[in-house]
Image (tube, rainbow, N blue to C red):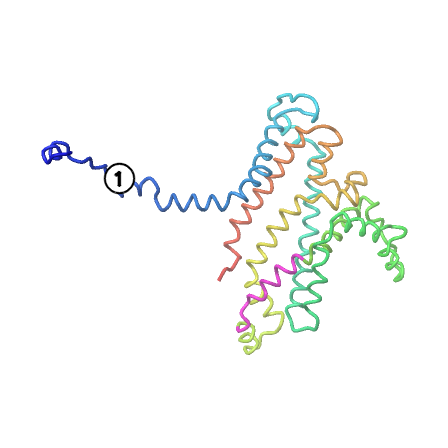
Amino acid sequence: MTTLQDSKSNPPRVLPRVSKAGASKKFSPRLRYSLIVALFLLPSALPLLCFTIIPMFSAFWVSLHQWNLVGSMKWVGLDNYAKLISDPMTQSAFLHTIYYIVGYLPLVYIGGLSIALALNSRIKARNLLRGLYFLPVVSSWIVVALVWRWLLNPSTGVVNWLLGLIGIAGPGWWTDPSWSMPAIILASAWKDIGFIMVILLAGLQAVPEELHEAATVDGAGWWRRLFNITLPMLSPSTFFVIVLSLINGFQVFDQVYAMTGGGPNNSSQVVVQQIYDLTFRYGKAGEASALSWLLFLFILVITLIQVRGQKKWVNYA
């Protein structure tokens, strides 16, 4: 039995209390918030890391070597980059890619804007027309390219047959070095115009109708309202379309591969087609990886210039 004297000589132990300040420092609200965000981002971050970031830096490592995809790699440093920069084929591929963008971007933007303006008005069956114009966007690029290859066939194609009905001799299209790239531009614009239409149509529907009504009351005509109200208010959508179209334009490949294969006489050889050929036709994976990084840096510079220049003409009000 414990006596009163024993309890006085052996007082009960008191556990040390953890200060709230220490606990809050260990798991601060900001840290907990960051962990929660990282947990929700993990399903998307892991594929991005595995299939984009790691392959990018792996390609950079390969670009510093000479490799045929089978044997061992041989270190060459920056020789692949120096060789590609001075190579006339690479310069020609970049020029053909720029040629494609110069022809494709105005055509697809003006066409998409025209259809968006028409479908934004009160016309019958506009929902059906929106679906029909968007249908090529969800079609396979290989199927679209093969269909346009048939339509633009110099001897049996529908386009040249229609031109012949009005007395115009149709060109050689994808069999003619002078017309191979315009043929690819036409097919690309036809497929992508529906996507541009949807983006611009969403921007048009965000323009307050009161602005058009006030301008109409002041006597402004349709063209004046278009250039003074519609296009300035549509500038964020236009900026998005231009940036996205330029990035996709520099990476054009599917339609070139299916319609011309870079020919005839390399007249439609673009950068990504050359990357493909260097890798799988000539076994020069190091040069192909170096060219892919040159293309990435070129797109990055162009995009940064656009982002810096948007302050002068994009209206977010």
Query: Which span of residues is magenta-colored?
Result: 195-210
Considering every residue shown, the one lying at the far front of the view is 1
- Closer-to-camera residue (288/132): 132
Residue 28 image point, x, y percent: 34, 44
Please tell me whether residue 207 belongs to the stretch shown in magenta.
Answer: yes
Neighbours of disc 1 within 10 Å: few (<14), some (14-19), many (20+):
few
Task: Determine the residue located farthest toward the bottom in the rendered image.
Answer: 217
Q: Is residue 17 left or right of residue 185?
A: left
Report which residue position mark 1 lands on: 18
Q: Nearer the viewer, residue 31 or 165?
A: 31
- State which quarter of the image contains the N terminus: top left
Residue drawn 66% across and 28% down?
286
Q: Amino acid at mark 1?
A: Val
Left or right for 107, reference 162 = left
Q: Magenta stretch containing residue 235, yes or no?
A: no
Counting from the top left corner in percent of width and height, residue 30 is at: 37, 45
Q: Residue at x 55, y 74 (%)?
A: 215
